[in-house]
Amino acid sequence: MTETAPSSSDVSADDFRLIQQQVREFIRSAVVPRENEIMREDRVPDDLRAAAAEMGLFGYAIPAEWGGIGLDLVQDVELAMEFGYTTLSLRSMFGTNNGIAGQVLVNFGTDGQKKQWLERIASGEVVASFALTEPGAGSNPAGLRTRARLDGDAWVIDGQKQFITNAPSASLFVVFARYADAEPGKPGIAVFLVPADTPGVTVGPKDAKMGQEGSATSDVHFDNVRVPADALVGGDAAAGYKAAMTSLARGRVHIAGLAVGTAQRALDESVAYATQNTQGGQRIGDFQLVQAMLADMQTGVLAGRAMVRDAARAYVDGSDRRIAPSAVKLFCTEMVGKVADLAVQVHGGAGYMREIPVERIYRDVRLLRLYEGTSEIQRLIVGGGLVRQAVAQS
């Protein structure tokens, strides 16, 4: 198995500032004006997808040697805060390529697997989909029921996954499956690379969701799916659970950054509304209770941004890759839910109207507290981790 620890960035601070500025300009001038179009049509337009691919956004977190830009997590979260400023479906389009799917290959794939897939993932030619969640197993991968058995020189996979992001457009599924019953210290989970056109792979209809129009999720069924032995990520069946935990932890910090970006957008919309609209002939931004709501929103944004940056640094330097990712994901996704609620309140009845940005934001951010580990799971990880640390030090 070839495993690499998260490393420092391939990109200098000066170069990154240019990348960040380019992304910010793209988001605010090209994507924000088309948010309602994306919502109404429930898809990201082809020209925006092409522009994102041209900018390298399908591979910004993949190392340069494999065709990506090579940003580390400290830089990644800065872009996440830019992506969060608009419809979350844009980021979803290339999020799994850079995140939980792509990082499994970057950190755990064999050289052959990287050579086969990473350059095409980084370019956007291949959309990679992370097939972990299934009925009865979501935030806790230990509950997986999808099975993989060795049959001669091939693995045979059977099971069902659900809520799989980008499944309808995926070329590659990174599939988590149980190859053995769990034992203490041995979860018995492996990870497989399964091309979407493999016989026995069936993608269900697109899910109808509360929000995040423009992003697609669906069920994926694996019925007697045969893949060669070299489809096993890292060439080691026992590596699967570690791959899942490492990729999810990194992704949690990214999601926290995304939440901060969305909270900033909700705040900006609310400040603009409060300064431009009146009630009874008086600007509503002059009302003290409206100012109090804006103050609470600003406080959450500032706290979240600082926490995201701190957690990203701790992940990159290796000082905390478990407790801090869960804590920051918990805080920031809960924070953005409160900020979105306050934003609707500041807007009054207008905030409840479709095609008003804060109405979409209110629906979009609800998912952030569910995927890549629910808030309840994050509390268990943080609390349990602190207890185990204390016991180990006693």
Image (spheres, grey):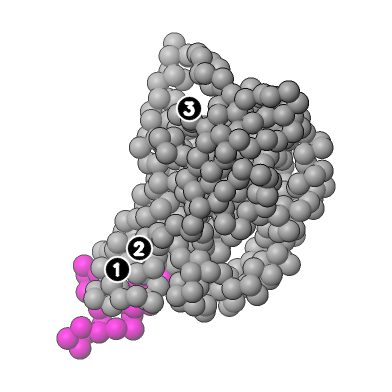
Residue 225 drawn at (x, y percent): 63, 37
The residue drawn where x is 50% and y is 13% is 184
Relative to the observer, which residue lies in front, 73 or 179? 179
User: Local crowd at mark 3 within 10 Å, few (<14), some, or many (≥20)?
Assistant: some
- The stretch drawn in magenta includes residue 328: no
Relative to the observer, which residue lies in front, 304 or 372? 372
Label 3, secondary structure: give it: helix
Which quadrant: the N terminus? top right
**Range drawn in magenta:** 267-290
| Residue located beneath label 3 in the image | 142
The residue drawn where x is 39% and y is 68% is 360
The residue drawn where x is 82% and y is 37% is 112
| Residue located beneath label 2 in the image | 362
| Residue located beneath label 1 in the image | 344
Relative to the observer, which residue lies in front, 151 or 323? 151
Residue type highlighted by circle 3: Ala
Pointer 2 with pointer 3, Cβ within 8 A: no
> Between disc 3 and disc 1, whose residue precedes?
3
Label 1, secondary structure: give it: helix
